[in-house]
Image: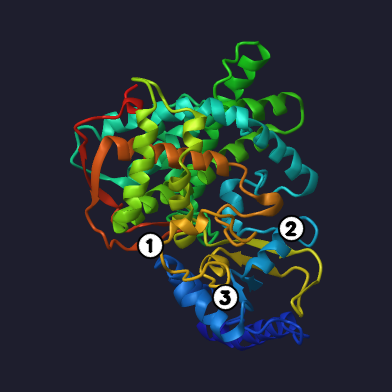
Amino acid sequence: MSAYIFSLLPPFFFILFLIHKTCNKNTTKLPSGQMGLPWIGETIAFYRAQRKNQLFDTFFQPRINKHGKIFKTRLMGSPMVVVNGATANKFFMSNEFKLVISSWPTSSVELMGKNSIMEKQGDSHSCLRGIIASALAPAGLHAMVPRICTSIYKHLQKNWQHAEEISLHRSTKMITFTIVLQCLFGIGIEPETMFGVFENVLEGVLAAPVNFPGTKFSRAKKARAEIEKVLVNEIQKKREAMEGGRDEEDGMLLSALVGALIRGEITEQEVVDNVVLLVFAAHDTTSYAITMTFKMLANHPDCYSLLLEEHEDIARNRKPGEVLTFDDVKKMEYTWQVARETMRLCPPIFGSFRKATSDIDFEGFTIPKGWKVLWTTYGTHYDEECFPDPMSFNPSRFADPVQAYSFIPFGGGPRLCAGYQLAKLIILVFVHYVVTQYNWSLVYPDESIVMDPLPFPSKGMPIKISPKSVISSSTAL
């Protein structure tokens, strides 16, 4: 039997070789690069660099140095062109739905949902984005500031007030998860009961889509099914309340989605999939941005002094027991410069995948129909043409507008993150409450960052904390 199997191997590999050659014929206009092994391509090298959070240093940069800002490769079974630079970002982001469409790996689609805005195209995408954007319009954000303040204050009182050391990353993940679940969606379940389940889903979003017991993807699928049961129940309760005129209008985004469901504009599955996606999109990347902001502040005390002065000035102008307002948050200009510079150096996502819907001519090359396109945040964030001395931490570079499509932690074009203003609010308000209430310092100033599948501090970024002797009036609720 084994001899028979081995006899089949030569023709099997010959067929793979022919497929490989066929996929790469007529490559005279393709960018240079290495396609690697048939089907596998350079996936192993990509994953190895990703786990160590060295995608730029050990995967992208060596290929850029060798082949230029545009190069070909094969990742996760797909022939792919990696593009870098503000010009490329503008071209591909602005041509969404025209030349390219979103095309995430199978595991991401399965776990986030085939009916999420991530996968929607054209009119379906516009419809969902309009619903989400309406809930996150300025009026809605204004109303959310006091609720965000209350959530953060309660979290700090419960988890920080009597502690000497806490895991900053764990704490920020929990508070952002709580804000998204309770303030944005109005889902009344205890966040602690669902936090671990969502984390299990996250572990599988870039894993191999092998639904075999014991694999990351299999565990993630089970967790996704558990989440869906809870969400369907919450959606049905919200629908009954809205149809019966009993909706308290908490959870503005869930109300907006269920309202569209009642009007027949979207399905229940679309509501479920978009709640799942938006919980991940709004809380995990935001918590990482907050964590890294504090790391940068710890390593740059001069910047911290300027930031602290900004927040103490704001606190002094609040009455005792008065929460922050949207206008207060608008005054945190230097803090937002610090946060943006942090996200430039430590982007929460490495890029995004697209698929060519027709042959694309760009910069003298042809990207064949069906090929994937990957734009990277590193391609502009670390580019001297966009940001002089790119590896230095310099928040003041954001005091003036930066080149369009060069700073892209939230994407751009029609798929610009709909919740980026909410992320901004959470970051700024959290920083305010911490720096005005606590003295803090990093336990491990040189803690390494790893990635699985998103970046996170290897030790959880523990910090030593002690309450300040005088708490600013705006922090007392």
Locate residue 315 relative to residue 337 in the image: left or right: left
Question: Which quadrant does the C terminus fall into?
Answer: top left
Residue at figure coordinates x 39%, y 51% from the top left = 293
Q: Report, in whole angstroms, how far the alpha carbon at label 1 lies from the one at label 2.
A: 32 Å
Residue at figure coordinates x 75%, y 68% from the top left = 370
Q: Residue tagged by mark 1? A: 450
- Please provide percent x and percent y for residue 320: 33, 20
* Residue 51 marker: none
Residue at figure coordinates x 31%, y 46% from the top left = 168
Q: Quadrant of residue 270?
A: top right
- Please provide percent x and percent y for residue 427: 44, 42
- Is there a contact, CB below 8 Å, between mark 1 and mark 2? no
Q: Residue tagged by mark 2? A: 94
Q: Report, in whole angstroms, how far the alpha carbon at label 2 lies from the one at label 3.
A: 30 Å
Residue placed most toward the observer, 329 or 226: 329
The kind of residue tagged 3 is: Ile
Mark whose residue sits in front, 1 or 2 = 2
Classed neighbour count for the residue bearing mark 3: other residues with Cα under 10 Å, few (<14), some (14–19), many (≥20): some
Upstream in the sequence, badge 1 or badge 2?
Answer: 2
Q: Residue tagged by mark 3? A: 40
